[in-house]
Image: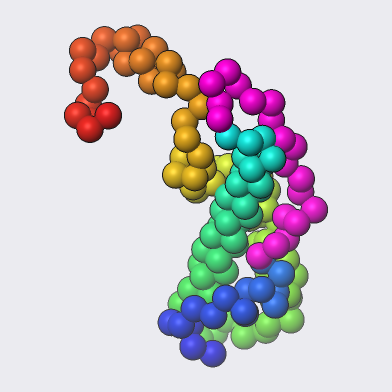
Amino acid sequence: MDYNSFDPSRLLDKGVAGQLSGTHVAPQPAAAGDSVDPAYRAKATEAAVKFESFFIGHMLHQMRDGTRALASDDAPKDRINDDMLDMADNLVADQLAGKRAFGVADAILRQLLPPQQAVTATNVSSSQNFTKPLNPQQ
């Protein structure tokens, strides 16, 4: 098997992507000044969490493949439990993504959704005694 080429169908066959399909993200009530539809926000959040799960799952699979490749020649090459290890990796990835442990979903949502309130940024900068924004483009 060629580990250098990425084949998403291999991960889809093992059930990595779409594993959170049973997880439902409830629409959140719109905050004051929020122009985004709550159903769209929920769908975007669910998609971002699923992508984070896919990302973490793929990373775990690559790490496990790397340890197998670096294992000594004396180590047993038994691949009996590979399916169970893949399932465990997927479950760990789902749990980590559900808690947004890596922040990938949050980064995606920052790009997809407009900020909810501009007041938050001014409150943070005034509490830290910033006289001007660090990024002049803001």
Which residue appears at 69% of the width and 30% of the height?
28
Q: Is residue 12 left or right of residue 65?
A: right
From the viewer's perspective, is residue 31 above or below residue 62?
Answer: above
What residue range appears in magenta?
Answer: 17-35
Which residue appears at 70% of the width and 77% of the height?
13
Closer to us: 4 or 64 = 4
Q: Main secondary structure of the magenta part?
A: loop
From the viewer's perspective, is residue 120 above or below residue 60?
Answer: above
Q: Is residue 103 visible?
A: no
Closer to us: 137 or 57 = 137
Q: Quadrant of the N terminus?
A: bottom right
From the viewer's perspective, is residue 14 above or below residue 30?
Answer: below
Which residue appears at 24% of the width and 14% of the height?
130
Q: Position of residue 107 (x, y in %)?
A: 46, 44
Q: Is residue 27 visible?
A: yes
Q: Quadrant of residue 9?
A: bottom right
Q: Quadrant of the C terminus?
A: top left
